[in-house]
Amino acid sequence: MVYDVAIIGAGVTGAMTARELSRYELSVCVIEKESDVAMGASKANSGIVHAGFDAKSGTLKARFNVEGSLMMEKITKELGVKYKRNGSMVLAFREEERDVLLELYERGIRNGVGGLEIINGERIRELEENVSDKALYALHAKTGAIVCPYELTIAAMGHAMDNGVELFLESRVLDISCDNGAFEVETTKGTIKARYIINAAGLYADKISRMVGDDSFEITPRKGEYLLLDKELCGLVGHTIFKVPTKMGKGVLVSPTVDGNILLGPTSEDIYDKEDTQTTRVGIEKIINSAAECVKNIPFGSVITSFTGLRATTKNGDFLITAPKPNFLNLAGIDSPGLTAAPAIAVHVSNMLKDMGLELVEKKDYTSTRKIYQVEKSRYNKMVCRCEKVSEGKIIEAIHTNPKAITVDAIKRRTRSGMGRCQGGFCMPSVVSILARELGIDVCEVRKSGGDSRIVVGKKE
Ligand SMILES: Cc1cc2nc3c(=O)[nH]c(=O)nc-3n(C[C@H](O)[C@H](O)[C@H](O)COP(=O)(O)OP(=O)(O)OC[C@H]3O[C@@H](n4cnc5c(N)ncnc54)[C@H](O)[C@@H]3O)c2cc1C
C-alpha cells in the first residue's frame, strides 16, 4: 500500500501532527526507531507550557509558542491529560536586570502574550514565600502552565491511532528514495511507501533530510540535565521560577510538575554526541547552585532521580519548517518551546500539505476522545506500585490502550509505576509478570526499554 502521509519520528511534534491529520480521510503512518513514542526530547524536558515572551518577535518560535499555549488547555482536556496553569516568574536579582525584565515584557506584548506584569520583591514573596529574599523584581506571566510531556505525547499518538493512524515502532529509517511520484522509505523492518513525508526526527532531522538530498542544515545537541525531588516537597513553589535568560537559554528553573514533584534544571551545554544522555557531577552542581539562588532551603537530600534531555538546535536558532523537496516537509530544530508549540505546528503542517495539493476531507467517523481499554473492575483493587498508588487495572489499561505499552519503561511513562521514591524497587517484578501475561510472552522476553534490554535472564528449574 502507499500511505498518503508518512511521519518520521514519534515525539510530540510527530504525534501532534499525526493527530491533526487523523481528522481527515487520509492514510497516515508514523515511523519510529525506538520501542515507544516520546523517547527523544519529548520525554526529557521541563514540561512547561511557555507563555511566549521569550522567543524573538517575528520568529516561528514566537508565533507557534503563543498559538500553542492558547490551544493547550483545550487539547489536554480532549486528551484527558493533566494541565495546570500555575504561572511563571522570571526573577531579577540586580537593579540593572530590571531592564531585561522590561525587554521580556515588551517582547511578550509584541508576541501577543496576555497576563504579563512586573512585580516587586514584596509581591513576589506574597505569591511565593520560598523565593529568595534577594529577588528584587519578577516578570509574572499568568498564562504559563505545566503538563507532563510524555503523557501528552502518548495521548496525542493514542488519539491519532484511535482515528486510524498506524504506528511502526522499532523501525529505524535507513534511506529514502523516490519512485513514480511516491517515496520509498527503507526501514529496519521493511519498506514503507508514501506520497508525502514529514520529517519530525528531532536530533536526526538533518540525517533524514540528507536522505532526500538536502544538506542545508545541521542539528547540534544541546544537553540539559535535571534533578527531580520527591513529592514530599510538593508546595515548595507553585509557580515555575526562572532567572533572567542568557544567550544559552532560559537557564535553570525550579518548578512543580503536574504530578506533584519539584523539578530543578536544565543545564545548557552544546555537545557533539547525539546519544549522550548521561548526567554529570558538573551539571548537577550547576543545577544545585543555580536553584539555591532562586529558592530558599531546597532539601537536596530529597532528590529521587536525575535525567538528561537533548535539545535539537540549529545555527539560526529558529524552528526550521521547510519543504526542501516536493511533498517532503522538514520539522527540524524544534527545540524549546517545541512542546508548547507542537499543537500549532501540527495545524500549520496540515495547511502546508493542503497547499502542496493534498486533499483534506474531514472524516465523518472521527472520534474526539480517546478510547481507553476497559478492564475488569476488581483489577483496580490490587495495588502494584505503592509509592505512586498504581493498580493492576491501570497497568492492564496501559498495555491494551493505544499506543500499547510493550516494555516496563513504557508502562512507567503511562502509569507512573516505578516513578516514586523507590524508583521501581518494589513494583518492577509484578509489572514484569503482568506484561508477560498480557502480551502472552515468557517473563524472560519482557524488556525494560527497547533493544535487548531483557530483565529476567533465566529461570531456576
Ligand atoms: C532540556 C530540555 C528542556 C525543554 N523544555 C521545554 C519546555 O519546558 N517547554 C517546551 O515547550 N519545550 C521544551 N523543550 C523542547 C521540547 O522538548 C522539544 O521541542 C520537543 O520535545 C521536540 O519534539 P520532537 O517530536 O520534535 O522531537 P523528539 O521528541 O526528539 O522526537 C523525535 C523522534 O524521532 C525519532 N527518530 C530519529 N531518527 C529516526 C529514524 N532514523 N527513524 C525513525 N525514527 C527516528 C526519535 O527516536 C524520536 O522519538 C525542552 C527540550 C529539552 C531537551
Image (cartoon, rainbow, N blue to C red):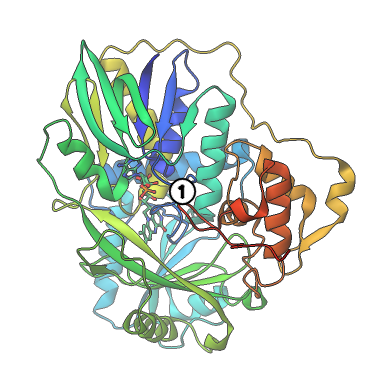
- Residue in front for this viewpoint, 186 or 54: 186
Drawn side of residue 10 relative to residue 437, left or right: left
Q: Residue at x 49, y 27 (%)?
A: 166
| Residue plotted at (54% across, 54% down) | 148
Residue 22: in sight, yes or no?
yes
State whether residue 250 appears in this view.
no
Residue that appears at 33% across and 20% down: 193
In depth, the one of 255 and 112 nearer the eye is: 255
Q: Quadrant of residue 413?
A: bottom right
Disc count in the image? 1
| Label 1 within 8 A of ligand 1 by Cβ | yes
Q: Residue furthest front?
A: 461
On the image, which quarter does residue 53 sit in? bottom left
Q: Position of residue 32 (x, y in %)?
A: 40, 40
Q: Position of residue 263 (x, y in %)?
A: 50, 70
The one nearer the camera, 75 or 399, is 399
Front-lying residue, 400 or 419: 400
Label 1 crowding class (10 Å Cα cut-off): few <14, some 14-19, many 20+?
many
Callout 1 secondary element:
loop
Residue 243 image point, x, y percent: 35, 74
Residue type indicated by callout 1 = Ala
Q: Quadrant of residue 242?
A: bottom left
Image quarter hosting the C terminus: bottom right
- Classify the position of the N terminus by image quarter: top left
Instruction: Say left or right for 420 vs 305.
Output: right
In this rendering, the answer to whether 306 lies above or below 220 is: below
Where does label 1 land, which residue?
A: 38
Image coords of residue 349 (percent x, y): 33, 28
